[in-house]
């Protein structure tokens, strides 16, 4: 079951980022009293009343602006609206209704999505309470007055937001296929890879409209196994965008990754590995998904030698140092080079994602590891590891009980992780560790 997507939209400088940070529970968006400071959508996982959802912040909408930056922000906001399940429209009680609010409201109505109207900056209901009623003129239903700065009224607002969450449409528990999302910057060959796989395997179960506009779920049967490839290509852009166009793929990437088991991160070999590639791959990493990094267009690299691939691989591992578990594959959607290896790698990564290790085996590994490398100490107190057990899969999650969580440095956690990987591989799969303190453990 995928997470619902809630897009926070509105004209510039109405307090969208402050509200976003409050709902997300942490400072993510840049907050500055200057219109247009949030120039690209920023996303975060959020939760309210046991409803988990993805919150998307957007740049301010200036419907008629010809300014290049504002025009790009408007296009990005439109993409967020197209992808969202619920739209949170933020206005400003201090400036009151302005023409731009009516124009944004018309834009939102055309989307056909549920809209919740938020009137922000109501720092005093005694002073501004009556001014909220003016916003009924937008024709979007009841306005909810809030103060993001003072954290007032947000509960009632979120109560209304979650009322509009879809339910049955989000449930795909009956689908047992392995779900593989193709993610990456625009024009790296995501659709070409899917099309080539279709041509090679020639067994198509169905093409199903995805949960985001222009996203297609393609089911393929290979060697008796069913796979669902989630393609996020097909981005429609109005005009030429020159400023970091990969930003436009972020929200679709979030939606695709959320539904996927494994992510194929496609990189254009002719462009080399970029920060944009690392940022997009980071979405899969943070979501705990399996990751296979596919370098496409490998056939287009001229004058290759026996060292070319190793040199490129070294650059990849440097850029993706934060995810050392990732698998790598050099492919060509044009020629079909190594494409069938995608299925083999997906199968192995999926097996790793769902692997469970018996507690006794884990504790044997932990005992050997602590014998080979003594746990750290601080001010005369040494870390003791009492017990380790696996509590979940997808991603595999381990709980380690210790005498003092402050002594469990991340480097020693990484050391334990490496010992587990040496024994069981867990290829292409992140591992999650939870450190718990067991009081009185020394005497037990």
Image (cartoon, rainbow, N blue to C red):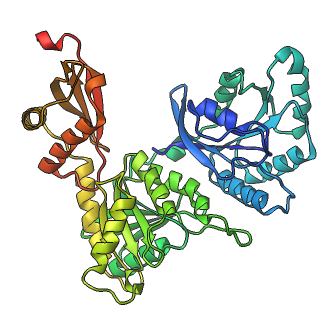
Q: Residue furthest bottom?
A: 303
Q: Is residue 133 shown above or below 259?
A: above
Q: Is residue 176 left or right of residue 235?
A: left
Taking the spot 73% from the left edge, 56% from the top edge, the residue there is 73
Q: Quadrant of residue 119?
A: top right
Q: Is residue 430 left or right of residue 358?
A: right
Q: Nearer the viewer, residue 425 or 343?
A: 425
- Relative image position of residue 378 (x, y in whole percent): 24, 22
- In which quadrant of the rendered image does the C terminus lie? top left
Taking the spot 79% from the left edge, 49% from the top edge, the residue there is 109
Q: Quadrant of residue 438?
A: top left
Q: Is residue 253 shown above or below 414?
A: below
- Relative image position of residue 229 (x, y in whole percent): 42, 64
Q: Quadrant of residue 74?
A: bottom right
- Relative image position of residue 125 (x, y in whole percent): 83, 17
- Relative image position of residue 358 (x, y in whole percent): 13, 36
Taking the spot 90% from the left edge, 21% from the top edge, the residue there is 130
Q: Is residue 136 left or right of residue 305?
A: right
Q: Is residue 128 left or right of residue 396?
A: right
Q: Nearer the viewer, residue 192 or 72?
A: 72
């Amino acid at each position: 079951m995928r997470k619902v997507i809630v897009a926070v939209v509105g004209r510039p400088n109405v307090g969208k980022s402050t509200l976003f940070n409050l709902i997300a529970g942490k400072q993510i968006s840049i907050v500055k009293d200057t219109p247009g400071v949030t120039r690209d959508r920023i996303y975060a996982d959020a939760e309210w009343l046991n409803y988990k959802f993805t919150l998307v912040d957007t740049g301010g909408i200036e419907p008629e602006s010809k300014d290049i930056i504002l025009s790009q922000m408007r296009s990005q906001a439109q993409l967020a609206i197209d992808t969202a399940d619920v739209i949170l429209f933020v206005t400003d009680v201090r400036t009151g209704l302005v023409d731009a609010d009516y124009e944004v409201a018309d834009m939102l109505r055309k989307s056909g999505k549920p809209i919740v109207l938020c009137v922000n900056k109501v720092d005093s209901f005694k002073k501004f309470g009556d001014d909220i009623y003016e916003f009924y003129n937008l024709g979007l239903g009841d306005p909810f007055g809030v103060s993001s700065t003072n954290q007032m009224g947000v509960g009632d607002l979120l109560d209304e937001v979650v009322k509009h969450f879809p339910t049955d449409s989000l449930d795909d528990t009956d689908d047992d296929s392995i779900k593989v999302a193709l993610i990456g910057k625009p024009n790296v060959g995501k659709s070409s890879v899917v099309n080539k796989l279709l041509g090679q395997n020639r067994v198509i179960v169905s093409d199903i409209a995805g949960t985001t506009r222009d996203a297609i779920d393609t089911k393929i049967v290979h060697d008796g196994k069913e796979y669902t490839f989630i393609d996020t290509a097909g981005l429609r852009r109005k005009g030429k965008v020159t400023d970091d166009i990969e930003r436009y793929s972020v929200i679709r990437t979030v939606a695709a990754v959320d539904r996927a088991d494994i992510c194929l991160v496609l990189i254009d070999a002719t462009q080399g590995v970029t920060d944009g590639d690392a940022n997009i791959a980071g979405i899969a990493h943070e979501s705990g998904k399996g990751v296979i990094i596919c370098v496409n267009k490998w056939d287009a690299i001229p004058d290759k030698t026996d060292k070319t691939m190793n040199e490129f691989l070294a650059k990849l591992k440097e850029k993706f140092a934060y995810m050392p578990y990732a698998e790598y594959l050099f492919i060509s959607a044009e020629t079909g080079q190594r494409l069938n290896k995608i299925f083999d790698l997906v199968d192995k990564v999926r097996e790793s994602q769902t692997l469970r290790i018996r507690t006794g085996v884990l504790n044997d590994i932990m005992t050997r590891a602590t014998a080979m490398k003594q746990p750290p100490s601080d001010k005369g107190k040494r870390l003791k590891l009492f017990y380790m057990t696996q509590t979940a899969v997808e991603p595999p999650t381990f709980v380690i009980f210790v005498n003092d969580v402050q002594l469990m440095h991340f480097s020693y956690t990484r050391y334990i992780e490496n010992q587990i990987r040496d024994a069981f591989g867990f290829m292409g799969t992140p591992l999650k560790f939870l450190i718990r303190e067991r009081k009185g453990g020394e005497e037990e």
